[in-house]
Image: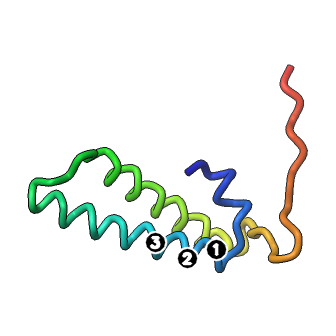
Amino acid sequence: MKKEQIRELTKDELLQRKTEMEQEMLNLRLQRASKELDNPLRLRSLRRDVARINTILREEELQIRSLAQRDEKTTFPKEKQE
């Protein structure tokens, strides 16, 4: 999940996604312990996505950057690339 996609979500949606990802990580760890893990890279990917979500939530908490609002999702115009 890209950071731009994460920033478009509201705080409630981010917390829900984080919970879902942590549950999936638990399931993958159990599969790894029983030697049934098909894609070990998925565990790393989930761990990094959770870290991204935590970082963005912390930025919002410190008021460094604000999250999208429930009714309006902030979209920024793409910068001109020359």
Counting every numbered tag in the picture gives: 3
Asked if marks 1 and 3 touch (Cβ < 8 Å), the reply is: no
Q: In which quarter of the image is the C terminus?
A: top right
Q: Do the residues labelled 1 and 2 touch (CB within 8 Å)?
A: yes
Label 1 and label 2: CA atoms lie apart by 5 Å
Q: What element carries label 3?
A: helix
Q: What element carries label 1?
A: helix
- How packed mark 3 is, by other alpha carbons closer than 10 Å (few <14, some 14-19, many 20 or more), is few
Q: Where is residue 72 in the image (x, y as percent from the top left)?
A: 88, 70
Pointer 2 residue: 16
Q: Please name the residue that numbered disc 1 is placed on.
A: 13
Up/down of 5 relative to 66, above or below: above
* Left or right: where 68 falls relative to 46: right
* Residue 20: numbered disc: 3
Residue 63 sits above or below residue 52 on the image:
below
Residue 61 visible in rendering: no
In the rendered structure, the answer to whether residue 53 lies left or right of residue 51 reads right
Q: Position of residue 54 (x, y in %)?
A: 52, 68
Say if residue 5 shows up in the picture.
yes
Residue 16: x percent and y percent?
Answer: 55, 76
The image quadrant that residue 24 belongs to is bottom left
x, y (%) of residue 28?
26, 61
Which residue is located at x 61 percent, y 65 percent?
A: 56
Instruction: Kindly report the distance in space between the C-alpha atoms of the residues bearing marks 2 and 3.
Output: 6 Å
Residues at circles 2 and 3 in contact by the CB criterion of under 8 Å: yes
N-terminal-most mark, 1 or 3: 1
